[in-house]
Each structure stands twice: as C-alpha cells, then as structure tokens.
C-alpha cells in the first residue's frame, strides 16, 4: 500500500480528485495518510476531515523562524513515512533538505504546459492571466517531480486544454482543472503506486 501525504494551501479540489479516484478505484493500492496545509483556513483541511483523513495545519506564522517551520513540516511528514508526497496547490517554497530527501518521491501539479507560464511567481490565477495576455490558443496542466528549481523537475504527465475567445482567467482556470488537473494528478499517483514511472536525469517516462 502506497502511503501519500498531500500538501495543499487552498480549496483542495485536486485533493478531492485524489480522494474520489481512490474511492472509485482509479488510483489503486494507495492511502492518503495525512493532509497538511500552511493555511488554517484552507478548505482542503475540511475536505480531508470529512473523510476521516488526518489533517493538520503547520503555519509559518506559528514559528519563530522559517527554519523552525520547515523543521516541524519535515518532522511531521517523516512521522508518517510516506512513499510519495503530493503538492496539490501548495504555495510554500520547499526547503532543499526536503527536496533531497524525497528526490523522485515528491510530485507537483502545475496549471500550465511547462515550460510555459511557470517558475517563480507563476501560481494559481496568475498563470491563467498570463496565458490569456499572451494569447495562447492551447494551455493545460503538468505533473512533474519536484527538484531544486521552481517547476523544473522531470515531467511525468501533461494534458492540453483549449483556450476560448471569451475566457476570463477564472473560466480558464476552471476548465484546466476539470479537463486536465483532476485527471492527470490522480493518474500520475496511480502510475507511481504501480511502479510504472521511471526517471533518468531530467526525463521521466511511463513503462
Ligand atoms: C491548482 O490550479 C494548482 O494547479 C495550482 O493551484 C491550484 C490549487 O487548487 N498550483 C500552482 O499554481 C502551483 N504552482 P486546489 O486547491 O483547488 O487544488
């Protein structure tokens, strides 16, 4: 059984997609051992509690320094011994020590086709605003392993989504979630649980 820890800062719709996919058997042999948020008001925590999943808030506001916050975050994760960490809209910079420890064992969902509209400052609605500004006709979502850069790790899955003439950033965000994120994030977890993802240097592939 693969134990996963999901880290989320906001609404948690991606978390919900994971929960639903486990219930429907679309993700096999996997349990969510814990959900952690940096934001005590994150609806992701309520979603977890509704399903009896342990849910904890670890907020940097409650620690005297960034180091203390990271220490608590890492210790809490280690206490669960997860096989995989899933960043599902987690808006905290991941400390290097955690990246090293969970190399190729930590994945992130990003709401664009990397390498477009990614990197520092590109998160949430901002990504879709920039895609609309640039006038792209196709955007999408990417699941990738987390490495020391921002959105630079090996790409596992991507899915394209059409941009329509009258889209606002909010409408586009919703379409990218519905058509891409909520599909490829659960799919990547299932592939991981089945040991199907191989990585060599910057490239990941499905076997
Ligand atoms: C999602 O769109 C996710 O791709 C994005 O935050 C949103 C979280 O929504 N993540 C990033 O922008 C990371 N760079 P959710 O809380 O409803 O899953």
Image (cartoon, grey):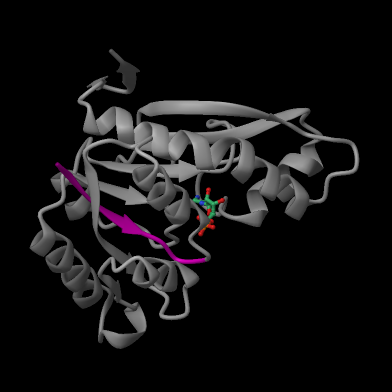
> Which of these two is toward me, 20 or 57?
20
> Which of these two is toward me, 59 or 189?
189
Q: Is residue 39 visible?
A: yes
Return the x and y of residue 66 as percentages of the image width and height: 28, 74
Tell me which segment is drawn in magenta.
1-10
Q: Quadrant of the N terminus?
A: top left
The residue sitting at 31% across, 67% down in the picture is 36
> Which of these two is toward me, 57 or 71?
57
Q: Is residue 5 magenta?
A: yes
Q: What secondary structure predominates along the stretch shown in magenta?
A: strand
Q: Left of 143 or right of it: where is 179?
A: right
The residue sitting at 23% across, 33% down in the picture is 193
The residue sitting at 30% across, 28% down in the picture is 191
Determine which quarter of the picture holds residue 157.
Answer: top left
The residue sitting at 84% across, 35% down in the picture is 164
Determine which quarter of the picture holds residue 121.
Answer: bottom right
């Amino acid at each position: 059984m693969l134990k996963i820890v999901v880290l989320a800062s906001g609404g948690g719709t991606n978390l919900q997609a994971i929960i639903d996919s486990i219930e429907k058997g679309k993700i096999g042999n996997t349990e969510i051992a814990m959900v952690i948020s940096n934001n005590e008001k994150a609806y992701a925590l309520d979603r977890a509690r509704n399903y009896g999943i342990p849910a904890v808030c670890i907020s940097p506001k409650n620690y005297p320094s960034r180091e203390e916050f990271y220490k608590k975050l890492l210790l809490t994760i280690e206490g669960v011994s997860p096989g995989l960490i899933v960043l599902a809209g987690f808006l905290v910079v991941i400390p290097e020590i955690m990246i090293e420890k969970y190399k190729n064992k930590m994945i992130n969902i990003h709401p664009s086709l990397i390498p477009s509209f990614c990197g520092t400052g590109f998160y949430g609605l901002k990504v879709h605003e920039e895609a609309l500004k640039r006038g792209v006709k196709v955007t999408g979502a990417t699941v990738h392993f987390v490495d020391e850069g921002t959105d630079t790790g090996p790409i596992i899955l991507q899915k394209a989504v059409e941009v329509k003439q009258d889209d606002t950033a909010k409408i586009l965000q919703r379409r990218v979630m519905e058509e891409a994120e909520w599909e490829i994030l659960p799919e990547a977890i299932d592939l991981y649980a089945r040991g199907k993802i191989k990585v060599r240097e910057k490239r990941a592939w499905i076997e």
